[in-house]
Image (spheres, grey):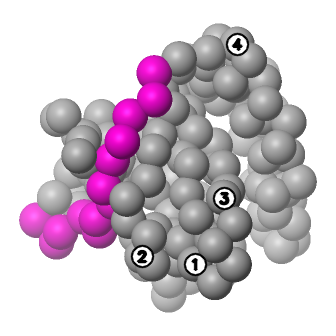
Amino acid sequence: MTRFAETISAASRFANRRGIYAGRRSTRVHAALYRWSKGRLGGYMPGRKSARILLLDHTGAKSGTPRTSPLMYVEAGAAVAIAASKAGQPNHPAWYHNLLAHPDVTIRLDGEVRAVRARIATGEEYPQLWRSFVAMTPDFEFYREQAGSRVIPIVVLEPR
């Protein structure tokens, strides 16, 4: 891990321990840069090229409003998986509830748009997927600790 990545992780952990979650505040700009550059900007965590990011386009469970969420992902065969970590906050992210209500969504990987269907990872596949997230960035272990009794769901996005 680079010194830059260590600094970002330390700052993120500092904020998360104090209940500060900036996810929604930065999403609009992140998504715009990602789309404009076809993933060259915003396509990975700064300082961690292995921590890849996709854009999840989904629909609000109650509002029906279109939403976009930049999320880290891991490959899962022909599918990709995302973790509903919300950086270790005590509740699930809104996008997770949206996927439960409307599982047919699209994702953008770099410049490619894919139609996918969301499902919750099974008990058998969860441990391996979780190890993949931790291998991508150790921050996921911190998120699990911060989440307390909340089990962080992993969502598999399969091609449709």
Q: CA distance from mark 4 to mark 1?
A: 29 Å
Residue 120 lies left or right of residue 18; in this view the side is: left
Mark 3 belongs to which amino acid? Pro
Residue named by callout 3: 66
Residue 22 appears at what percent x and percent y?
84, 56
Mark 2 belongs to which amino acid? Leu
The residue lying toward the viewer, choosing from 63 and 19, is: 63
**Residue bounds of the magenta highlight:** 112-124
Residue named by callout 1: 61
Residue named by callout 4: 37
Closest to the camera, between mark 3 and mark 2, is 3
Q: CA distance from mark 2 to mark 4?
A: 30 Å
Q: Which mark is residue 3?
A: none
Task: Tell me if residue 151 is in the magenta stretch.
Answer: no
Secondary structure mostly seen in the magenta stretch: strand
Task: Tell me if residue 113 is in the magenta stretch.
Answer: yes
Closest to the camera, between mark 3 and mark 4, is 3
Residue 74 visible somewhere in the drawing:
no
Q: Which mark is residue 100?
A: 2
Closest to the camera, between mark 2 and mark 1, is 1
Q: CA distance from mark 1 to mark 3?
A: 10 Å
Please report whichever mark, 1 or 3, sits nearer to the chain's N-terminal start: 1
The residue lying toward the viewer, choosing from 23 and 129, is: 23
Mark 1 belongs to which amino acid? Ala
Q: How many other residues sit within 10 Å of disc 4, few (<14), some (14-19) or many (≥20)? A: some
Please report whichever mark, 3 or 4, sits nearer to the chain's N-terminal start: 4
